[in-house]
Image: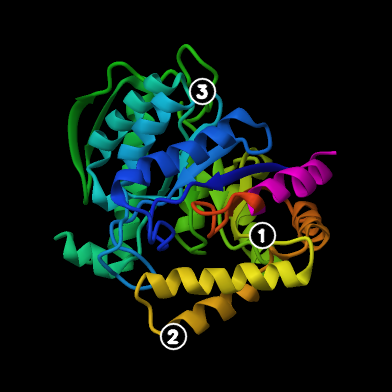
Amino acid sequence: MRFGVFIPQGWRMDLVGIEPDRHWETMSSLATHVDQGDAFESIWVYDHFHTVPEPSAEATHEAWTLMAAYAASTSRVRLGQMCTCMAYRNPAYLAKVAATVDVVSGGRVEMGIGAGWYEHEWRAYGYGFPAARDRLGALREGVQVFRDMWTTGSATLDGEYYQVDGALCAPRPLQGTTAPGSALNGIPMWVAGGGEKVTLKIAAQYADYTNFDGTPEVFDRKSELLRGHCDALGRPFEEIVRSANYNVVIGETQGDVDDRLASYGEMLRRGGLADAKVDEQVASLRSQPLVGTPERITETLRDMESRGMTYAITYFAEAAYDRSGIELFEQQVVPALRG
């Protein structure tokens, strides 16, 4: 199994209490820790502007700015976003940004892309909030622009949502030119989301990787639907790596796990959430698949691997303040699943 890890950027209130002049040091030092190890193949950020579970004045650092910073400050780990919202940036422009970051990083970019969902920030930033049909239509056209820009160096599209007329991408990404990359796309493309009629069909056509629900029953159903879309297109299902995101709360004992859950609740309280909302969030986290001892988490991931989930992208809520959970995962879970 392969592993990635999210670097805290504030979106999930995971930089609360850290002064802004220490944010980059906090984020970059954790990225350096991951980069200098060998447990995690990739680091990830979220593409959002306002915090969750509620919008607040707490920090949320912008995804592609961080991509450029990590490109220059790391040397091994691959760099992903889970996931970039297509409508937040013109796709030709974003393809150009990603190509530049790929050059700066020496060919380490992963393009995570989706239709977007966070209505509050859409409207706050002046994007409106189109119907799902239109968000998905823009996603389909945008990934076509990405592929053309990266594999041929230019794109032209007179679409319903985007009009691109000879947009040039020079230089093209290193991946697919002077460095190994996706045979289909140059930069590997992750189409995120489990929409059964449209998103998974787009993934079947364009994706190198998918990312959808990592619970057994849902993962199985989405996988079979993806297989059906691949069959309809004549594409080998096995070409697409299936991944899932996981919130991880790990401890040597159940008592340690409970302590981490309590600390998570306190972090949210410091961010200004009301007690009832904090209790709701903690209860939700407690019930998730990768909450428990190393042995329990390893067993869960082995089961998911048997179902075809071969890339786990992990999130540790406390990472900006305490790396011991990440270190325990690196020491006990990763080796067991790589062996």
Q: Amino acid at mark 1?
A: Glu
Circle 2 sits on which residue?
275
Cα separation, mark 2 vs mark 1, equals 40 Å
Q: What label does residue 224 carry, if any?
A: 1
Q: What label does residue 75 carry, if any?
A: 3
Cα separation, mark 3 vs mark 1, equals 37 Å
| Residue 166 pos. (x, y %) | 19, 26
| Residue 219 pos. (x, y %) | 65, 62
Q: What label does residue 119 carry, if any?
A: none
Instruction: Please tell me which of labels 2 and 1 falls first in the chain.
Output: 1
The reply to whether callout 2 and callout 1 are in contact (CB within 8 Å) is no
- Categorize mark 2 by other alpha carbons within 10 Å: few (<14), some (14-19), many (20+): few
Q: Residue at x 55, y 49 (%)?
A: 210
Q: Residue at x 29, y 49 (%)?
A: 20
- Depth check: 177 or 44 in front? 44
Residue 93's place in the image compared with 196, above or below, is: above
Instruction: Please tell me which of labels 3 and 2 falls first in the chain.
Output: 3
Classify residue 161 as left or right of residue 244: left
Segment tinted magenta in the rendering: 325-339
- Categorize mark 3 by other alpha carbons within 10 Å: few (<14), some (14-19), many (20+): some
Q: Is residue 128 among the parts visible in the rendering?
A: no
Q: Is residue 330 among the parts visible in the rendering?
A: yes
* Quarter residue 162 falls in: top left
